[in-house]
């Protein structure tokens, strides 16, 4: 079920268009992205690295740099411990390369997803102690590791935490109190007392800012940190950070450098995915390159991905990149099977009717639980936890919807867990098997969600006739990139198309090519990526079997389609044609057939 809304934000669109030399449509699109001042619009359209925030605004950043500088000068052994996802691998890469540049005696560890679990733990601390490590720097983790860090401090280790996850807290009588680890420095923009003006950066960006200050301390030109922009862009997109403010600049700058990257391992990864000749976008980072890096951390060890990024031997890079590509293919098949099992579980147990879906897949590989949770969330538009059985008990991952703050809701039932952490939109957990049903029941009892929250909201930018489209306008839309969380691709809509021709492309049943004609007779090619069988079933439900069959055969019919769309140029065998990509549709019929 969907509700369509057309944005109705007001502004002097002609005035904005004139000042920024854009079309009034583009002016409206910027206003729809909550840009209200000329300064915001200028930064959105033309922001550069000079517009990034000063790293020293991060609470404890200078303190952490002073500690690390002293340790480097004293020749102390430093170890970086990161998370095992793209953000963790990228953060580790940035810190490792940055510390080496400053002359540090440094190595790195990435927890094993299965053996170690998320973040820093006692085993990794014992290992560091036994290896003669003096200082541990965490990245993309550590903020929720107060007990583990206290243990490490008791052994005499120094800790510098760099993280971006929500800070754990307790709440009593309406008073909220943060629980910060007692590290020597805790660098996290989400600390209540951190004055950093933009809280939405990922772990790799925190690491990037830290290295900038470290270079300052060692008299190294900050400009050298620009070699890390590709990985800050990758991490920002893959950790689904909001693509606004400085994140937008970092991703734009990283993408600009991506095709000519000086990182041999990244070049090899681009090559094995046949992207060398393509203009890389946030889509390629989030759905092609990033998943290859993630696959190593999911199915074997994320060290493979970090080793690839650090490798300088071109032939070895090629072999390592191909291995990650194969791992990702394996991960995709496991995910497909897990998604099918999740649907069966919800239907057979009746839990499909719960407000918060808790799916128990005991045999699912724990590494893909989060991906499956995301797919199920997309299907039902409900918060989802996918729980798997491991040797240490149950582990799970959650994915949420905008109206459900997943981390805060988990705090309310924190006694169910042996370990947990996360964001408003995603979370991870460990628990004893005997607590599973209690967890499900208490989450649902606490949930304040209503049926309205489960209706998918389709936010349309402008009702724009396809006859208005031009190549010039499509080129102008490039100024809005990179697209992603918080800066979605523009969505346009038009009513009343007749479907003059339609055919399925390929054998997957997931692609339809159509020729649409509007009420003025203007024709436009369209493509739809989705379940073709479902598409025709919806048409039949609205217009009847006879009219649907006439439409499928290319005969005139009374089927009418409203759709939302995004325009693009289709290049095929040297020919360039304009087409629209249909995103949402709804059918009506003048005289529904039987």
Image: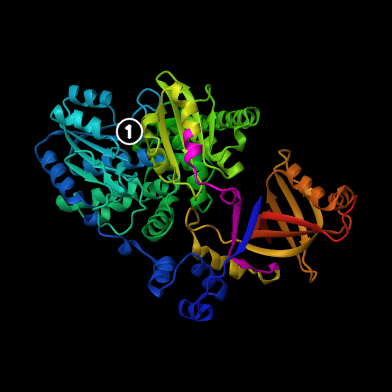
Q: Is residue 43 above or below residue 333?
A: below
Question: In the image, is 3 to the left or to the right of 12?
Answer: right
Which residue is denoted by mark 1 in the rendering?
119
In this view of the protein, which residue sits in the foreground, 255 or 410? 410
Question: In the image, is 471 to the left or to the right of 304?
Answer: right
The answer to whether residue 18 is seen in the rendering is yes
Which element carries disc 1, helix, strand or loop?
loop
Taking the magenta stretch, the answer to whether it contains residue 454 is: yes
Q: Is residue 405 above or below residue 7?
A: above
Q: Quadrant of residue 558?
A: bottom right
Which residue is located at x 49 percent, y 70 percent?
31
In this view of the protein, which residue sits in the foreground, 394 or 30? 394
Question: In the image, is 112 to the left or to the right of 453?
Answer: left
In this view of the protein, which residue sits in the foreground, 76 or 348? 348
Taking the magenta stretch, the answer to whether it contains residue 167 is: no
**Would you call the spot at circle 1 few (<14 residues within 10 Å), some (14-19), or many (20 or more)?**
many
Q: Quadrant of residue 576?
A: bottom right
Q: Identify the magenta region.
A: 442-466
Residue 379 is situated, as x and y percent measured from the top left of the image, at 61, 42
Residue 16 is situated, as x and y percent measured from the top left of the image, at 48, 78
């Amino acid at each position: 079920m969907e509700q369509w809304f057309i944005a109705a934000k007001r502004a002097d669109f002609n005035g904005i268009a004139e000042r920024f030399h854009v079309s009034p449509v583009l002016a409206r699109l910027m206003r729809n992205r909550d840009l209200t001042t000329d300064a915001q619009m200028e930064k959105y359209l033309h922001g550069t690295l000079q517009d990034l925030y000063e790293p020293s605004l991060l609470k404890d950043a200078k303190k952490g740099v002073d500690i690390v500088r002293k340790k480097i000068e004293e020749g102390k052994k430093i170890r970086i411990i990161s998370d095992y996802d793209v953000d963790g691998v990228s953060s580790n890469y940035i810190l490792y390369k940055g510390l080496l540049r400053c002359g540090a005696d440094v190595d790195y560890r990435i927890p094993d997803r299965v053996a170690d679990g998320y973040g820093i733990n006692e085993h990794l601390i014992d290992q560091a102690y036994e290896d003669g490590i003096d200082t541990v720097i965490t990245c993309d983790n550590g903020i929720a590791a107060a007990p583990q860090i206290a243990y490490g401090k008791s052994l005499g280790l120094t800790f510098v935490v760099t993280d971006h996850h929500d800070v754990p807290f307790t709440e009593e009588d309406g008073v909220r109190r943060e629980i910060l680890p007692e590290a020597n420095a805790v660098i996290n923009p989400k600390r209540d007392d951190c004055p950093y003006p933009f809280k939405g950066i990922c772990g790799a960006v925190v690491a990037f800012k830290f290295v900038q200050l470290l270079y300052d301390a060692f008299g190294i030109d900050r400009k050298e940190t620009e070699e890390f922009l590709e990985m800050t862009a990758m991490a920002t997109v893959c950790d689904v950070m909001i693509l606004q403010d400085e994140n937008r600049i970092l991703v734009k700058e990283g993408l600009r450098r991506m095709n000519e990257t000086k990182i041999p391992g990244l070049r090899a990864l681009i090559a094995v995915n046949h992207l060398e000749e393509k203009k890389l976008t946030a889509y390629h980072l989030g759905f092609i390159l990033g998943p290859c890096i993630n696959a190593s951390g999911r199915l074997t060890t994320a060290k493979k991905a970090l080793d690839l990024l650090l490798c300088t031997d071109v032939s070895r890079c090629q072999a390592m990149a191909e291995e990650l590509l194969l791992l990702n293919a394996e991960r995709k098949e496991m995910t497909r099977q897990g998604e099918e099992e999740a649907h069966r579980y919800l239907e057979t147990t009746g839990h499909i009717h719960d407000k918060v879906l808790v799916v128990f897949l005991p045999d699912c590989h724990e590494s893909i639980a989060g991906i499956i949770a995301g797919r199920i969330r997309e299907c039902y538009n409900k918060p989802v936890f996918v729980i798997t059985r491991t040797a240490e008990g149950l582990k799970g991952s959650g994915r949420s919807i905008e109206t459900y703050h997943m981390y805060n809701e988990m705090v309310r039932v924190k006694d169910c867990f042996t370990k947990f952490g996360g964001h408003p939109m995603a979370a991870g957990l460990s628990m004893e098997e005997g607590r599973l049903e209690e967890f499900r029941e208490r989450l649902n009892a606490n949930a304040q969600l209503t049926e309205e929250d489960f209706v998918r909201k389709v936010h349309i930018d402008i009702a724009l006739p396809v006859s208005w489209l031009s190549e010039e306008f499509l080129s102008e839309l490039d100024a809005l990139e990179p697209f992603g969380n918080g800066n979605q691709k523009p969505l346009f809509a038009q009513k009343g198309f007749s479907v003059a021709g339609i055919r399925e492309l390929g054998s997957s049943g997931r692609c339809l090519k159509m020729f649409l004609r509007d009420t003025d007779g203007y024709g436009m090619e369209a493509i739809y990526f989705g379940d073709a069988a479902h598409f025709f079933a919806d048409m039949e439900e609205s217009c009847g079997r006879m009219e649907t069959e006439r439409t499928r055969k290319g005969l005139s019919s009374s089927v009418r389609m409203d759709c939302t769309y995004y325009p693009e140029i289709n290049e095929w065998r040297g020919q360039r044609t304009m087409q629209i990509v249909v995103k949402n549709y709804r059918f009506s019929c003048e005289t529904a057939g039987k």
